[in-house]
Amino acid sequence: ENVCTEREEKEEDITSPDNEEISTNGGTNGGFGFHSFSSFNLNVQSCAEKQHKYICTSIKNVNGRKRTEKITRQCCHGFGRPRNGPPNAHCQKLDLYSMEETVERLGAKEFISTLKKSGLEATLDNDVTLFVVPDSAYTSFAEQMWENNLVAFDPMARAKRAIDFASMTARDMILGHTVNGSYYIEDISNEQLLKTDLPGANIRINIYPRGPMTLARDQSYAEHPYRYTANCAPLLKLNRVADRGIVHVVDRVLVPARNTLMDIIEARDDMTLMRTFLEMTGLDKMLREQGDDKHFTIFAPNDDAFLKLDKDIRRKLKAGNGCAMNILKNHILDITFCSLAAVNGVKTSTYNMLNEKLEFEYAMVGKTRAPSTGVETGEIEEEGKKMQRIRINGMSTIEESDVIASNGVLHVIDSVLPTDSGMPISNTLANHNLTIFKQLITDAGLEEEFDALSNRTFFIPTDQAFEQTEAGRYWIRQLKEHPETLRGNAALKEFLEYHVAEPLIKTCALEETNVPTKAGQNVRVNLYTTNPVFTTVMNRATVNCARLVRFDEETCGSVVHEIDKVLDVPKANLMEALSANPDYSMFQRLISLTNLTELLTSPDSGLTVLVPKNDVFLEVGSWYQETLQNQDELERIIRAHILPNVICCTGIVPSEWPFVRTTETVSGQQLKLNRNRRPQVQNAGITKCDVVASNGIIHEINDVINVQAQRTSAPAGAGSGNPFESFGSLARPLPFWF
């Protein structure tokens, strides 16, 4: 009973391929087959129940035309379900009053009095939604206008400052709080704009969750589990039904939002730098966009905040490069975040346009300035005393909140929010204590050039990596003993640029491949797994066998991966590296007697060579001499020491039965990999790891690799050393497998 039904129908052509009729080819099959001219008719129905209405929507798609029918059933005007009643409660007659009396009963007598004095009494005879202001807030607003001499309205001033209170008449104020039609708060979606009777002024509704501590003490929670704002002003009372229309009580006079965020920034004397930086980066165009789907929040540092920054950072901001873009985007959200969204007593978080988290919490801070809008975020105290304000990431304080624009809201903050993604590489190195590499860049005179790089991947050795490698110790000595020789040093420039790859590659996108560097040569990326079971899940990465120990640290337009070794540019191929070391002469002699020399000189081979030192061969001198005379045995032995892929020492992990890891030689034999006190390959321990050549790496080992000769008559996989021969050959182009 007492339920009114509204029906809306709409029919339209469907041009989208997804909505066209679906035909199937084929003939009949016992009367159950589809014919080529058959089509599917799609019927979809969905229903939703709200506090005061029940809505069912039906969509019928027949032969290319879509018919939508929406049926709304709700309590007729003058009837309603009891608050906090059961879901199936009947519509009961309400004691309704006139709009005037309803507003007065809600404590907004001054508002209704101004409405009458402005000649808008006829508005109350229509179906409208009023956002009314309590007498206390209304009186405070009127006094503020009087004190600021805002009672005399100059028509010229109205043309120049359309959104300011100074340009408003009392009539404008009432019109800016009046919306045609009845809007229950549950029927309004987040970010929805309600068109007011004041031309060009909308009311933006936002919905926020309640804080966990308010659930127990707030009696209205059961009725409204969310908090609502109108132009960022909290709604105190909701859905008060009058004989014509609905009333919502808002805690202050609403600012008419006519100007864009960029218009507001341009009009403020304390945001000249912010305006300049936005224009230099082109972000000003985004902040001028308007429309139902355009809503932004900008935490705008004032001029004093920018002046606190390092001069170099300000210079980069003025240049308008990628660094400046990221610094500014760190202050912008693509949602409307009113101060009410931050809950006192807990941390509230959201994500900015860089997808980086911003955390908000109330804190007691010293009051530094009087708010220009008359709006405070917390407790108001006397000048100079502490008060509650919202802090962002524990660093910046909101000094002035909820400056409303037609496309969002602006908050004034007292310091710039730092972000690694907005800092040039020199700052990132300093922040992460990569001091030696940074000092080398500075002394080489390359800091400005490196800071200007974008879309790069920086592989930066830690300070410990410099101290533990020969090439690193060399450059440390140069820094200490001959710093004057480093500026313009070609060798140092090549060394530094060899640590800069292109393009930007985060760890989630790493692949086993060669990556070009700024120095012109490639670095080799390899991936490994430390999991004994899931051997295809790669969780360890190296670049030229230097392990990534920290990764994905963002810098201006690029990314930084910290590594545990310095990257020295390899000048020799594998064969040249063997020839250059006298301790490898006996192994090098064996290779020269085979046909494998070309393999070790090929520029794209990507091999791992296991090299016994001369001491090893001298211990088995007679065997060595016999092998020199046996060409077949000689080649078999050498091939057992060459792997067709790069396996760095960091990729060799403990491997015990049943999870035995093996790798394959160039002749297809299986070698067991393990790590105890040191990395091991088959029967040999690796005594010197990762000698990087231009086409692979060398491991120095303490024994000759011992593998049995393959029997040609054996079935595939037999005699290969595979611990799971019954499964057949498991050879595949991965570093390790069972």
Image (tube, rainbow, N blue to C red):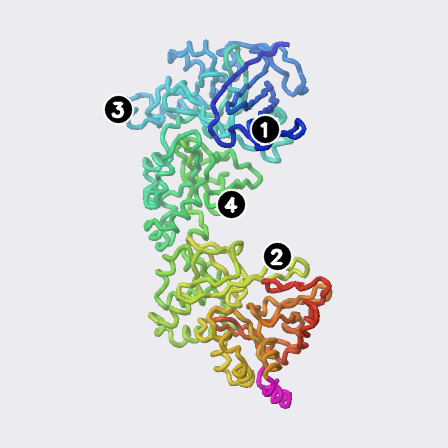
Viewer-nearest residue: 62 or 188: 62
Residue 682 picture location, percent across and down: 66, 74
x then y, percent, for residue 370? 40, 36
User: Is residue 427 visible from the viewing direction of this image?
Assistant: no
Q: Is residue 727 magenta?
A: no
Residue visible at 45% across and 72% down in the picture:
570
In percent of width and height, residue 439 lies at: 41, 66
- Label whose residue precedes the other's in the sequence (1 or 3): 1
What's the mark number on residue 367?
Answer: none
- Pointer 3 residue: 156
Q: Which residues are magenta?
A: 612-630
| Contact flag, marks 1 and 3 (Cβ < 8 Å) | no
What main secondary structure does the magenta stretch of the protein show? helix
Which element type, helix, strand or loop, lies under badge 4? strand
Helix, strand or loop for disc 1: loop
Q: Which amino acid lies under the numbered mark 3 shown in the image of this protein?
A: Met
Q: Quadrant of residue 672?
A: bottom right
Residue type for callout 1: His
Q: Looking at the image, which residue is at 45% across and 14% down?
A: 112
Indicate the amino acid at tag 4: Lys
Q: Nearer the viewer, mark 3 or mark 2?
A: 2
Along the viewing direction, whichever of 134 and 723 lies nearer the viewer: 723
Q: Earlier in the sequence, mark 4 or mark 2?
A: 4
Crowd around label 3: few <14 · some 14–19 · many ≥20 (10 Å)? few
Please tell me whether residue 624 is drawn above or below residue 541 in the rendered image. below
Query: Which residue is tagged 1?
Result: 35
